[in-house]
Image (cartoon, helix red, strand yellow):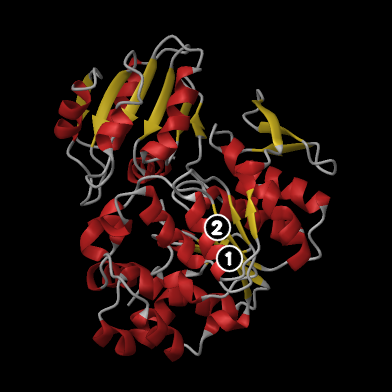
Amino acid sequence: MNYQETLHYLYTRTPLFQQKGAGAYKEGLQTTLALDAHAGHPHRQFRSIHVAGTNGKGSCSHTLASILQEAGYRVGLYTSPHLLDFRERIRVNGEMMPEEAVVEWVEANRAFFEPLSPSFFEVTTVMAFEHFAKQQVDVAVVEVGLGGRLDCTNIITPELSLITNISFDHVQFLGNTLAKIAVEKAGIIKHQVPVVVGEATDETRPVFRDKAAAMQAPLTEADATPLVQRFDIKPDGFAEYVTSVPELPTLRSPLAGFCQEKNTNTLLHVLPLLCRAFPKVDDEAVRRGFERVVENTHLMGRWQRVSSHPCPTVCDTGHNSGGFQYIARQLAELDCRTLRIVFGMVNDKDTDEVLSLLPREAVYYFAQASVERARPAEEMRRLAAGHGLQGRCFPTVASAYEAAQAEAEASDFIYVGGSTFVVADLLQSIKGNG
């Protein structure tokens, strides 16, 4: 098989949550443990950092990887989902796993894993761990796929664990209360492994405290001590953070979404643990890691400016109410003549809650992303109308974006989002036109 044939095999023979949603979810670690044993337990050959949470885990994972790279470590980074290329999920010092390595791994292991009927994520996780071992990484930053306790990444014993926050998402798998979701996320807390929790509520805080105590894991609650005093978005699109950390009075980052204030506060609380575990991390590596996170890791879709003509255009992968509380506030503070929003969601998200947060005065272009889970544009338009949001339907994200561009003036602003997959379709169309 060539690379494209290999991807088709993986997408069709192993259920992909990105496409199918609930039909691809597989609970438990038995298959992952079998795959890991077959591969020779590759995750034992490198140190790791484990990152979970409802929102912010991607930004935090990429920033941690960037800091470690700047400190001179060889760093694996495992994240999901991908936007343009499957290999975005598996990087070493920012470089994607080579196409031929993906093909070779599948061909070498398919006879073993086919009888196990693994999920796509189970296969991909062990593929990533074996790639990291072969590449002799010093450390891998591993992002949880879904939940934590039963997520297949949870076979690792990391140097430290990070849980960014808890909000309602994937409730059909993780539970319909914040406390139940917190139990699943807290499942990554390991015996005597330090853990940082970015944000907690009255409902979730006892869950984390009890689990940490039971596991004798030192717990840092980042929201108890705010370390970010303020942040500003500069004309060059970078965010500048003023902190109360004496060694790091200011930090610059190309991640300029309002949500990044919370993520940065969380990361500032992670830094003492990171420096203790990885002594080459110093203040300069931290500053460079924040500032070069996109350059070092090729992170996409976080309040990403994709065009300045005919007007500023930004896309963002925020896709649930926890993320949209920040996006909606950022949209509301824009200084523009007309806000034009290209929008779509998938059918298993908290659609009404997100729609209730969006600005009524914007012009909407509803589109259906090219995944099975995508909510049809006409259904999206009808639901939005119930919240006083008006707009037209388009068959694709690309056609919706083209219409928004055609109708925009220089003083307008175009936002594209609602789903990771809407952003993926936008970036794919831009890449195709480029």
Q: Nearer the viewer, residue 422 or 117?
A: 117
Residue 124 at what x, y percent from top left? Answer: 40, 71
Q: Is residue 407 above or below residue 369?
A: above
Which of the image's four quarters has the C terminus? top left
358 displayed left or right of 200:
left
- Residue closest to the far right: 247
Q: Which residue is mark 1?
A: 213
Asked if residue 263 is positioned above or below residue 191 in the image, the reply reads above
**Residue at (65, 49) in percent of width and height:** 267
Residue type, label 1: Ala
**Numbered label attached to residue 363:** none
Indicate the position of residue 83 as horizontal and vertical percent values. 41, 51
Residue 225 spot, x, y in % from top left: 68, 41
Quick check: 4 above or below 318?
below
Question: Which residue matches tag 2?
Answer: 209
Q: Is disc 1 placed on a helix, strand or loop?
A: helix
What residue is at 50 percent from the left and 66 percent from the top? 188
Could you tell me the amino acid type at mark 2?
Arg
